[in-house]
Image: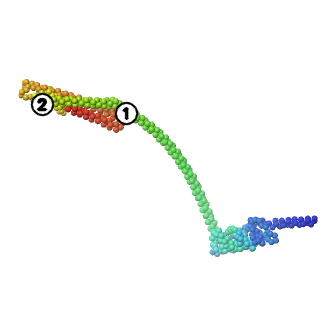
Amino acid sequence: MGTIIFLITLGGLISITLFVQLISRMKLVPPSELAVVHGRNKTYRGGRIFVYPLIERFDTMDLTPQTTSVVVESAIASGIVPLTVTATVSYAISTSEKGRQNAIKRILEMTKGEKSKLQTIASSIIEGHLRDSIAAMTPEEVMREKDQLISNMIQICKSDLEGIGLEITTMNIADVDDHRLSGVEEKHLYIDLLKRVQTTNADSQSREAKANAESSAREKEEQRRAEVEKIRLENERQNLEAELKVKIAREKQRSAVGAQEALRNAESEVAGIEAQIEAEKQRIEMVRAKCEAEILIPAQAERDKAIELSRAEAAKIRGEAQSELTQLKRTIDILESAGDQGLNAYIIEKFDELVKPFAQTLDLFPVEDLSVIAGTTPNNGPISSIHPHSVDLELNRRVEAIISNQQKLDRVEMDAVNILQDALEQENEQIEETSTSQGSKKSNRDSRQERVQRFKSLRKQHDSDQD
């Protein structure tokens, strides 16, 4: 029983020891440190590492940058001008794999407890290269082109610092001054004069910058005022444009309303005129109907009546002429059988009809007195020298009666013609007053002329029938 308890206790102690060893050999590496495991030939940055006991050893290197001040005294610049340059340099373990291996080999122990020694080594390397870089530059370039000096320094020191596992992270030229010998006071040396010049230039540049700033401020202020004025004018322009658009819209609306009103008025006037035209047409139709009823129809009836009378008269005249021709043939036969005495007796009896055509021509030659020369023979002379022959008297009387009757007939016919022409002219005037087109006037005038020509032809026919 005691043996079992001992074994259990021993096993528990061994387990606890192994557990403690396992926990103690589990290493945590922060991001700012570099873990070095001897026996693996590996480095770790950040994370968790298990280090086997007895066969592996664990070390760390601090990756935090270290800062040091490097003072280079009596650095001879170009032109043999001694300078004192103060630089502030930050350095750290190299980030390259080659640099880290060199750091493990050369400065691993220095990073633990001998950082001052490491700082001295780094300062010496940086000081030497800084002195060489200053020698390649003039004092003016050192004062003016510090960035170029720093860039050259980093490139030159890179290989040497990497050889011991370091690299420059940042560098700054803090001060550049004349190198002054101990015990000798010189007020105005080269760099002092340069600084004075730089100070003067800086003051001048400062004043210039201030003047430029003030000018720029004034310019910006004026520009701001100009922008404000421009915005104000633009707003006024937009307001004016808006007002103008509103006025234009109102005028267009007013014009549209006026145009519609004018259109309605015009349509009303057109409708009124059309109504007047229609009323005038109706009035013209009424006048035309009235004229036809009062003038044209009676005139046409009179014309038809005159035509019928003329035809009847012509038929009568033709009948009478035919009967006269028949009678004339009989008379000629009788006269031929009766001889000269019968012919003379016939001439005396028909003297009126023989002289009538001659009397109709007397209208062309007005006659006031007519004398008939007797054509008697000595055997049938007059009763006395004072009284004419009875035959001559009878002939004279008949000639005067025929001429008088013919003149009366001509006057009656002329009066009838004038009355008919006056009626036709009045009819034409009334038709022309009521007509509204040129075509109706022309047709009425043509109809009137046609009626006049027809009347004249009827008169000629009547005259020819009488002849």
Label 1: state its secondary structure.
helix
- Left or right of residue 198: residue 257: left
Label 2: state its secondary structure.
helix
**Amino acid type of the residue that numbered disc 1 sits on in the rendered structure:** Ile
* Residue 362 in view, yes or no: no
Q: Nearer the viewer, residue 357 or 384?
A: 357
- Left or right of residue 230: residue 97: right
In which quadrant of the rendered view does residue 326 lie? top left
Q: Residue at x 27, y 35 (%)?
A: 453
Q: CA distance from mark 2 to mark 1?
A: 71 Å
How many marks the image carries: the answer is: 2
Residue 319: x and y in percent read 22, 30
**Where 181 falls versus 281 (above or below)?**
below
Residue of label 1: 284
Earlier sequence position, callout 2 versus callout 1: 1
In which quadrant of the rendered view does residue 169 lie? bottom right
Q: Residue at x 28, y 29 (%)?
A: 305
- Left or right of residue 326: residue 189: right
Residue 429: x and y in percent read 32, 33
What is the crowding at mark 2: few (fewer than 14 residues within 10 Å), some, or many (at least 20)?
few
Residue of label 2: 336
Residue 356's disc is: none
